[in-house]
Image (cartoon, helix red, strand yellow):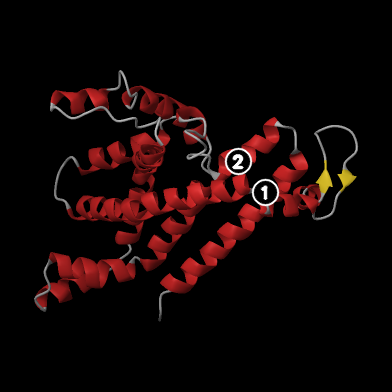
Amino acid sequence: MAFTLRLSFTDWRGSGAASWVGVDNYTYLLTNPAFWSSLGNSAVLWLLVIPAQLVIALVAAVLLDSGRTRLRAFYRVAFLVPFVTPLVAVAQIWVVVFDENYGAVNAALGAVGLPDIGWLTTSTWAKPTLALLFIWKTTGFIVIILLSGLQAIDGDVYEAASLDGAGRARRLWSITVPLLRRTLLFAVVLQTLAVFQMFAEPFVVTQGGPYGSTTTAGLHLYNHITRADLGTGAANSFLLVVLVMAMSLVFVRLLRSED
């Protein structure tokens, strides 16, 4: 970390001596439209992923925790399988399934008379398609995290609420969600880090296109490496650290549980 911080104030190409440039790398990034565009793309992906994923994971975790089925253990494993599957393999499958000309999704749309959609070739659909990939890949891990939080809630609380006439929806909103605030906060911070570091998904699926619409903060950072511009890349890294830390502090403030 200390080396990278020092590197961010230099011009270094990976060999030889690094030359001190002061804040030039930071000035370049903060005035570079491509840097801000990458942050904007990551912010849109965050909005597409986090709310939907938390709702899906919470509902799935509640059903798995309360379900009286012999297949509950199987479903828990099934939810986790996408998370442990190699990301590059999943991304390649996404490329095939969402191919505009030969993909299974457009084939299904054509079977019901709907037109083909350029899922990965149009700016309108590329980010939602990446968001769907991220949700499918990582939601199982969030389900496991929320399950651990649910199992820490005392069952007597639910029993008392039932005796007072609270239905399932009321118990979910008034008991489960408030008592899971710390767990939900952890999930939000964890996934915020993951979204702003997202690299393999756009690198494999869209290569940052079309027209830079899926060049995420993580992929933009990688582009400095391909140009051997390691000083600017280090500065980019620390700007992302500051941004994600600020967002995390906001989440802690908003979701802090009261005694």
Q: Is residue 192 above or below residue 209?
A: below
Q: Toward the viewer: 202 or 181?
A: 202
Mark 2, residue position: 220
Label 2: element kind = helix
Where does the image place residue 24, in percent across and percent down from the top left? Answer: 80, 52
In the rendered image, the residue lying farthest to the bottom is 259
Cα distance, mark 2 to mark 1? 9 Å
Mark 1, residue position: 236
Q: Residues within 10 Å of mark 2 (few under 14, many from 20)?
A: many
Label 1: element kind = helix
Q: Residue at x 38, y 46 (%)?
A: 141
Residue 151 in sight in this render = no
Identity, as a three-letter code, of the amino acid under mark 1: Asn
Where does the image place residue 166, in percent across and percent down from the top left? Answer: 12, 73
Q: Residue at x 50, y 69 (%)?
A: 250
The part of the image, by quadrant, that contains residue 128 is: top left
Do the CB atoms of the residues marked 2 and 1 lie less than 8 Å apart? yes
The part of the image, by quadrant, that contains residue 76 is: top left
